[in-house]
Image (spheres, helix red, strand yellow):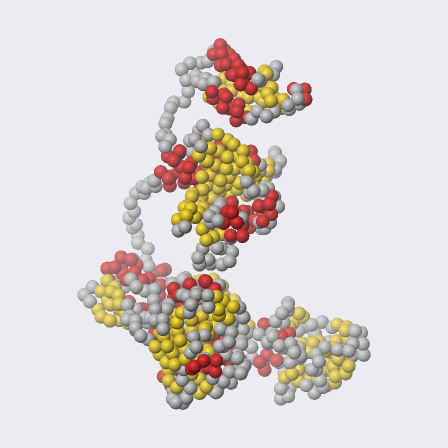
Amino acid sequence: MTLSHNWLSTYLPEPIEPEKLSKILTAVGLEVEQLEKKETIPGGLAGLLVGEVLTCEKHPDADKLKITTVSIGNKEALQIVCGAANVAAGQKVVVASIGTTIYPNNGEPMTMKKVKIRGVESYGMICAEDEIGLSENHDGILVLPDTLTPGFPLADHFKPETDYIFEIGLTPNRMDAMSHLGVARDVCAYLIHHEKKSTAPKNPLQGSNGFKIDDPKGLQIEVLLENETACQRYSGICITGITVAESPDWLKNRLRSLGIRSINNIVDITNFILHETGQPLHAFDAAKITGKQVRVKTLEEGTIFQSLDEKERKLSDEDLMICDGDNQPMCIGGVFGGLNSGVSETTTDIFLESAWFHPTSIRKSSVRHGLRTDAATRFEKGVDISQTVIVLKRAAMLIKELAAGQITGTIVDLYPHPKPKTEISLKYHYLKKLSGKNYHPDAVRKILGALGFEFIKEGADDLWFAVPYHKPDITLPADLVEEIMRIDGLDHIDIPSIISIAPSADLLGGEERWQETVCNYLTGLGFQEIFTNSITNSQYYTDAELETAVKMLNNLSAELDIMRPSMLETGLETVAHNLNRRNRDLQLFEIGKTYQQVATGKYAEQRHLSLLITGAVKTAGWQQKDKTADFFYLKGAMERLLQLMHVKNGSLETFHTPNINGVVYKVKGKVIAELGEVSTARLKRFDIKQPVWFANCYWDNLLPIALGHPITYREIPKYPSVERDLALVVDQSLSWQQMEEATEKAKINSLQGVRLFDIYESDKLGIGKKSMALNFVFQDSEKTMTEDDIDKAMNKLKSLFEKEFNAEIRK
């Protein structure tokens, strides 16, 4: 949220320096994330002077250029080449002389230099409004009043303001601080408590006591409240005879400080009130309200509504609409106005709306139509239902003052079911228990009173307070404790000299322990854990994949509309994000869920462990070269992980999909993991230009294996192991997996391990042949193995390979 220091200061009892105010805001829970100096006019018009055009002649070599001489006071008149069609002798104009920097609305700042234009020297520039940041107008140069004197500083004429803008990191529950008055309330509570000030915020709403109806028998709009659930209070007033015009400078400066563009005096007043009080308003052109009736209701599903942005929107039968007497929609209540009912330059009479709409209704309509407006943001958090009328009076008086209108008829205020205030009891011992500090009852009453809480009564061991309507999030005694501590300051809570703690206990279940073990193991291998969004973009997937996808009913945006059916795509988003920031060597893992619709209204979740590797897995050094990620590096990492989780007797099969080419591990027919290279087509979708290797482990299939394996221990063998190598000439089609499985079939008890350490291919071995070199490790736990023992085992293996694979022993 954005706040203006100048604007906020108008409600404080005395000015506070921006830096001090920043500290106060952060202390009361409104963390200032950024404090920026801002000028209402960029550059503050520094160096710009009033000039008088003495002569104006046509440029001899350009039809659209003119050569002028301009007086800027006591200095010598300047020769300036100007391209504006409206420049003429005798005008008072804005002059940027050599060395002056101008700040145009569109483009970078520009410092004036001596230039030659079509052969004629020019010593500055005669400026238009948009060229010096005054407005968007570029119809011609800015012609100033004749009363100004040449050489007069332009800044002294327009008096631009210097302001400081606070960027507040507002938490979702703090709707009461979504306005300058709301923030001023917190600041004053801090000053009352810490600096013993006794002044509340200067509240302009109190001036509404002077509100009066100018013409009680004038224009009146009837309001029919047909949906009392979605709209629990609706207020309105008619104002006639207005003149829609440009807003005064003070109002434009207030809005400009928050980055809001001025439109006209009526719209600007509603925006001003929104950011002053937090209450959204809407102004309707009264002439366009058919039947002089406003109906607050829902319409049939599919009704067409043309919104202010000139788009046709199909309404839901849950959208709360503000309609005219013919039930034609004029506005999506609390969200967005209609194209044909808003204020225009020809508007003379308006109906001003101030209402309370239900947060849930607003949220659904806002998300449904993709309209995230300032008004909707405030309504969906819950505005102050008690202030609709008083804010309406404040706005009507401003419109009367700035647009010369007359307040007519009577105030409409439909409030069929008034809300009672929530009452909360705060016990002293509970306050001490939660806060860790003893607060005097007077301090509690003073803090909460400054925040708008109404003290009701004091019991033997508690205090009773009524919660103000601008604090709808306050429902429990713990909320009151938070408010007290927030204003008092967490740094004023004493740290105890003795802290009592209980011994920690490992309360993790088997599943959680294995997850922690796997995460620690992968981290030790050099992987980094990532967490990606389980909501993703349907554009990543084919129509076939989307048939079983879980689609969002109220998606946050067009890019986040389904629950992910696969871990690959959200992982590739992370890879692309890092590659775009020149972080090219990645080893990532994630434990997450995928989602699937198995039948109408029935959904399934599946847990996964995914690995992503790309770039170099070892960087070059003086002892080694770069080692780039490949299939075998990923396969090795996955096999070590499966070994850690006691997966044995698995089979390995090749598989191919449009996204991955690789292998799949199966145990007893169940798929445990898939791994391989991500296809080029899939990488291109994410603009990834280097190979990526991906492994997907089905956690729900893997975990039971790990949980079902008891931990066993044995002594370290006393007797030494013996190694033997064997080179075999076999068919090129023979795989290592087949060799490994055949070795297990031999059932040699002393064989502790076998590994492939070399593959050699040559025509000398024969066509279609290759040599595979194996290393065998033998060890007997009962005795030292003799040469006869080892030879018997090796002969058995040789016979097996000759019989199974027609292998030849390579000499």
Residue 601 drawn at (x, y percent)? 39, 51
Residue 147 drawn at (x, y percent)? 62, 88
**Residue found farthest to the top:** 788
**Residue at 43% across, 39% down:** 699
- In the image, residue 60 sits, relative to residue 510, either above or below, namely below
Residue 739 drawn at (x, y percent)? 53, 23
Image quadrant where residue 654 sits: top right
Say which of 247 and 361 sits in front.
361
**Residue at 54% across, 48% down:** 542
- In the image, residue 768 sits, relative to residue 326, either above or below, namely above
Residue 751 drawn at (x, y percent)? 47, 19
Left or right of 382? Residue 160 is right
- Visible residue check, residue 591: yes
- Visible residue check, residue 151: no
- In the image, residue 449 sits, relative to residue 514, either above or below, namely below
- In the image, residue 89 sits, relative to residue 64, either above or below, namely below
**Residue at 45% across, 17% down:** 748
**Residue at 52% across, 24% down:** 738
Left or right of 633? Residue 398 is left
The C terminus: image quadrant: top right
Q: How many marks?
A: 0
